[in-house]
Image (tube, rainbow, N blue to C red):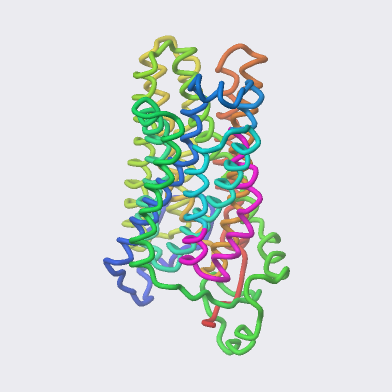
């Protein structure tokens, strides 16, 4: 049976293996992928370290922080992070990954270190804005590099490895920051994290070559294909800076659907980063040490499941199954499994609540690698991955702004964490339905790709 391109969920049938040539992936490419995962880990440690500082009495007294002030400090990162996603996504398509990432990595590490030297609230917020703006490069650059260097039957594993950094980072960020504060103080914590992070730039600049982007123009061709006979016209077309390219992307229902699923996925994960510790302590009565342990298990769980699910999906695709269908099945299964978080909210015992707390976030790992591989690799032409990812990351940043604010308001009006968790359940179900109905190959953006 020929490979099915249908986006409908049906029984997976094994079609004939494609005859496309296989391009070998070098050891260096996997090493650089590990560097990207480590870079993502550094970014999450730097962005979450502030949560530990905001619990320290001397830090709050130094800046004379009220609860409203603490809210502004927490949200400052995501405002600039959201604004710079699309411009920096375009930059990775226009100038390649290596140089923009190098500059931004240096900027956010320096801003993190300088946070330890700030003396006013306004300066503190400015530093958080700078960190958010510079870290906006991480996701678009990483996905652009993965898309250009790994085959379809490797992308799930590649994404799983990369996502280890994005999940281990928040798992260790607050504990590492807390340990440094106890061992030294909050000022030294910021300075040390910023300086140590700069060491990552050494292997990055030694191992990664300058990657030349491609020139593109809109066209009705399959993603990633070169339309014969149009090389001269494509080469003469301007790079991704044109508003015409942006209109092509925004005209794609698939891109809008991916933004919805990105929001739904990240609403849950940002809730876990910001409110799960308080839920475990205030509603389930865990001591701080035990709370940190269960938070760590939850984020390590999603990282392990994401890697395993990506690998299994790759093996199915390698055997000839439709990559779009395979990844959609895993994505929907993850959204549905994660929706069991609502069972933890209404659990009668602490042990039952803790089980669903860890299991629901871990189960979302079925979605993690496969959803992102589908929306940023499988359905997106190589030449516009950075820009499309930038648009998708706006939805991610919006989830980072909305999740803690809305959850806090729901907690205040209801007096319980049950209502915030019910809202999470609703978003996860929306994510599953959107994946099934909207993430279709015929609705993906189309471009003509050719070498510059």
Q: Give how far across and how far down residue 56 sits, in percent.
A: 48, 22
Prevailing secondary structure of the magenta residues: helix
Depicted 311 relative to depicted 432: above or below: below
Q: Give how far across and how far down residue 368 sits, in percent.
A: 44, 45
- Answer left or right for 377 relative to 304: right
Q: Give how far across and how far down residue 243 sits, in percent.
A: 73, 68
Residue found at x 62% / y 35%: 75
Res 222 → quadrant: bottom right
Quarter of the figure that contains the C terminus: bottom right
Q: Could you say which is closer to the camera, residue 393 or residue 192?
A: 192
Tally the numbered discs.
0
Q: Give how far across and how far down residue 436 sits, in percent.
A: 55, 47
Residue 99: in magenta span: yes
Instruction: Report the magenta residues as a range.
Output: 74-103
Q: Could you say which is closer to the camera, residue 128 or residue 141?
A: 128
Residue found at x 40% / y 68%: 149
Residue found at x 69% / y 64%: 246
Q: Could you say which is closer to the camera, residue 202 or residue 10?
A: 202
Depicted 226 relative to depicted 25: above or below: below
- Answer left or right for 113 relative to 68: left
Residue 169: in magenta span: no
Res 261 → quadrant: top right
Depicted 13 relative to depicted 349: above or below: below
Res 78 → quadrant: top right
- Answer left or right for 78 relative to 363: right
Quarter of the figure that contains the N terminus: bottom left
Q: Could you say which is closer to the camera, residue 412 or residue 221?
A: 412
Depicted 103 relative to depicted 348: above or below: below
């Amino acid at each position: 049976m020929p490979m099915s391109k249908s986006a409908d969920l049906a029984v997976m049938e094994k079609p004939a293996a494609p005859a496309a040539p296989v391009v070998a992936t070098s050891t260096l490419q996997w090493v650089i992928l590990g560097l990207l995962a480590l870079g993502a880990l550094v970014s999450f440690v730097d962005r979450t370290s502030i949560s530990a500082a905001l619990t320290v009495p001397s830090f709050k007294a130094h800046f004379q922080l009220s609860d409203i002030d603490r809210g502004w400090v927490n949200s400052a990162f995501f405002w600039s992070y959201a604004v710079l996603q699309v411009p920096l996504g375009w930059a990775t398509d226009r100038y390649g990954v290596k140089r923009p990432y190098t500059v931004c990595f240096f900027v956010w590490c320096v801003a993190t270190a300088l946070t330890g030297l700030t003396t006013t609230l306004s300066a503190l917020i400015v530093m958080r804005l700078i960190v958010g703006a510079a870290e906006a490069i991480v996701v678009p650059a990483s996905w652009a590099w993965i898309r250009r260097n790994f085959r379809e039957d490797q992308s799930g594993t590649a994404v799983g490895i990369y996502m280890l950094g994005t999940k281990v980072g928040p798992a260790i960020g607050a504990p590492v920051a807390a340990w440094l504060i106890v061992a030294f103080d909050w000022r030294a914590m910021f300075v040390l994290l910023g300086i140590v992070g700069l060491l990552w730039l050494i292997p990055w600049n030694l191992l990664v070559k300058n990657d030349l982007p491609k020139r593109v123009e809109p066209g009705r061709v399959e993603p990633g294909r070169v339309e014969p006979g149009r090389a001269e016209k494509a080469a003469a077309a301007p790079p991704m800076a044109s508003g015409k390219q942006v209109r092509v992307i925004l005209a794609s229902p698939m891109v809008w659907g991916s933004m919805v699923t990105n929001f739904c996925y990240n609403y849950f994960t940002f809730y876990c980063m910001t409110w799960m510790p308080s839920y475990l302590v205030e509603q389930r009565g865990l001591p701080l040490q035990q709370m940190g342990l269960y938070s760590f298990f939850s984020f390590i769980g999603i990282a392990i499941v994401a890697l395993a699910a990506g690998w299994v999906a790759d093996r199915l695709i390698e055997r000839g199954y439709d990559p779009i269908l395979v990844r959609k099945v895993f994505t929907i299964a993850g959204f549905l499994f994660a929706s069991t978080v609502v069972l933890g909210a209404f659990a009668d015992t602490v042990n039952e609540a803790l089980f669903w707390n860890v299991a629901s976030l871990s189960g979302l790992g079925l979605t993690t690698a496969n959803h992102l591989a589908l929306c940023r690799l499988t359905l997106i032409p190589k030449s516009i991955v950075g820009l499309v990812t930038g648009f998708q990351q706006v939805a991610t940043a919006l989830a980072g702004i909305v999740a803690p604010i809305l959850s806090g308001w729901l907690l205040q009006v209801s007096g319980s964490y049950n209502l915030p968790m019910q809202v999470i359940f609703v978003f996860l179900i929306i994510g599953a339905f959107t994946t099934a109905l909207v993430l279709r190959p015929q609705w993906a953006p189309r471009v003509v790709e050719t070498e510059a």
